[in-house]
Image (cartoon, rainbow, N blue to C red):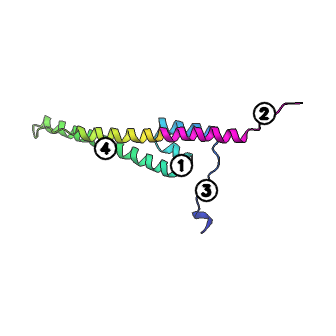
Amino acid sequence: MRASFRFPSRRPLDRSTARNSVLINQLATPGLGSLLAGRWLAGIGQLLLAVAGFTMVVAWFAMVLIQMYQQINGEAEPKSVAWLGEAGALTFAASWLWAWITSLSLLRQTKSSQNRLEPPNCPRP
């Protein structure tokens, strides 16, 4: 196998990378922080869930606007499409929760790797 096709080796996370990953996961887009930290499978899954949820919410909003326009013109009676918005919100919330669990895992991993790197407390002469 050529070297260009290999995945990079997982290096230990430092504190700043873990912190930035958590902030991106929770405040920007679920999944991007996980990808930054090297958690490819979790990051792609979280990102796909977040995009799917966002798409469903936008589709719900567009359908509500279309129904309002039709109602103003007297063309049709509105039908409830609330299920689409609720499903989208739940999907996005699931992505966010998964990102939070991954973020906590990243912080724990950083603490344990940092404890292994620190020298033991030795008395000074």
Name the residue nearer the viewer: 16 or 106: 106
Q: Amino acid at mark 4?
A: Met
Ranked by sequence position, the earlier of labels 3 and 4 is 3
Identify the residue at image location x=34%, y=39%.
Answer: 90
Ranked by sequence position, the earlier of labels 1 and 2 is 1
- Quadrant placement of the N terminus: bottom right
- Secondary structure beneath dot 2 equals loop
Q: Amino acid at mark 1?
A: Arg
Query: Relative to 56, is 27 on the left or the right?
Result: right
Q: CA distance from mark 4 to mark 1?
A: 26 Å
Q: Which residue is mark 4?
A: 56
Tell me, for residue 8, which label it has, or none.
Answer: 3
Magenta stretch containing residue 101, yes or no?
Answer: yes
Name the residue nearer the viewer: 87 or 120: 120
Query: Relative to 121, is 65 on the left or the right?
Result: left
Residue reaching furthest to the bottom: 1
Determine whether label 4 and label 1 are within 8 Å by CB: no
Residue 78, given in percent of the width and then of the height, sits at: 14, 37
Q: Amino acid at mark 2?
A: Asn
Q: Which of label 4 and label 1 is nearer to you?
A: 1
Q: Which residue is mark 1?
A: 39
Q: Which residue is mark 2?
A: 121
Determine whether label 1 and label 3 are within 8 Å by CB: no
At label 2, counting other C-alpha atoms closer than 10 Å, the crowd grade (few under 14, some 14-19, many 20 or more) is few
Ranked by sequence position, the earlier of labels 1 and 3 is 3
Ranked by sequence position, the earlier of labels 4 and 2 is 4
At label 1, counting other C-alpha atoms closer than 10 Å, the crowd grade (few under 14, some 14-19, many 20 or more) is some
- Secondary structure beneath dot 1 equals loop
Residue reaching furthest to the right: 125
Identify the residue at image location x=51%, y=51%.
Answer: 40
Q: Which of label 3 and label 2 is nearer to you?
A: 2
Residue 11, given in percent of the width and then of the height, sits at: 64, 50
